[in-house]
Image (spheres, rainbow, N blue to C red):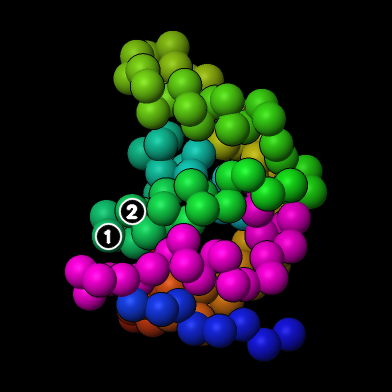
Amino acid sequence: MQITSAPDAPEGGVDVAGWAEISPLCPAHVDCAIAVALKVLDGKCKMPPHEAAIMMALYDAVRHLPGDKLGAESHAMISRARATETEDVRMDVYEARVLAETRISRPVMKGFKKMLRDQRVLPPKRAGGGD
């Protein structure tokens, strides 16, 4: 499957929404975007802040698409976490993130992130990078 590289955004960044619109993302990719969004909101994401921001933009661009194993509950949790930063919400996000990560195999997530790097949605992986 050939996926077009991400177009540039007007401000010199990546047009994540534009890329998501023209890319044939499967339900497993949507699950990965959901899981990474939960990880970012949980504070456990090891990506640099600009990459975490790209991943949140990607989540926003694909959240209307069907996932394979994740869906409405995860979307509600992400929405709640974005609106409320309390300890109980943080604990709920943690639990949702752990559950999401158990539902997605490591090879699927690694393949998703590699695809994003290959398509220049994310920058090339740095030596010793924290994906």
Dot 2 amino acid type: Ala
Residue 74 lies in magenta, yes or no? no
Q: Quadrant of residue 113?
A: bottom right
| Quadrant of the frame with the N terminus | bottom right
The percent coordinates of residue 70 (x first, y second) are: 71, 40
- Magenta span covers which residues? 9-31
The answer to whether 73 is drawn above or below residue 125 in the figure is above
Q: Residue furthest right?
A: 68
The residue lying at 47 percent from left, 21 percent from top is 80
The kind of secondary structure element at disc 1 is helix
- Direction from residue 80 to residue 126 in the image, left or right: left
The residue lying at 78 percent from left, 43 percent from top is 69
The percent coordinates of residue 129 (x first, y second) are: 36, 70
Give the labeled residue for mark 1. 50
- Direction from residue 82 to residue 74 in the image, left or right: right
Q: Are marks 2 and 1 in contact (CB under 8 Å)?
A: yes
Residue 23 lies in magenta, yes or no? yes
Give the labeled residue for mark 2. 53
| Quadrant of the frame with the C terminus | bottom left
The answer to whether 20 is drawn above or below residue 3 in the figure is above
Q: Residues within 10 Å of mark 2 (few under 14, many from 20)?
A: some
Residue 106 can be seen, yes or no: no
The residue lying at 36 percent from left, 39 percent from top is 43
- Direction from residue 107 to residue 81 in the image, left or right: left
Q: Quadrant of residue 23?
A: bottom right
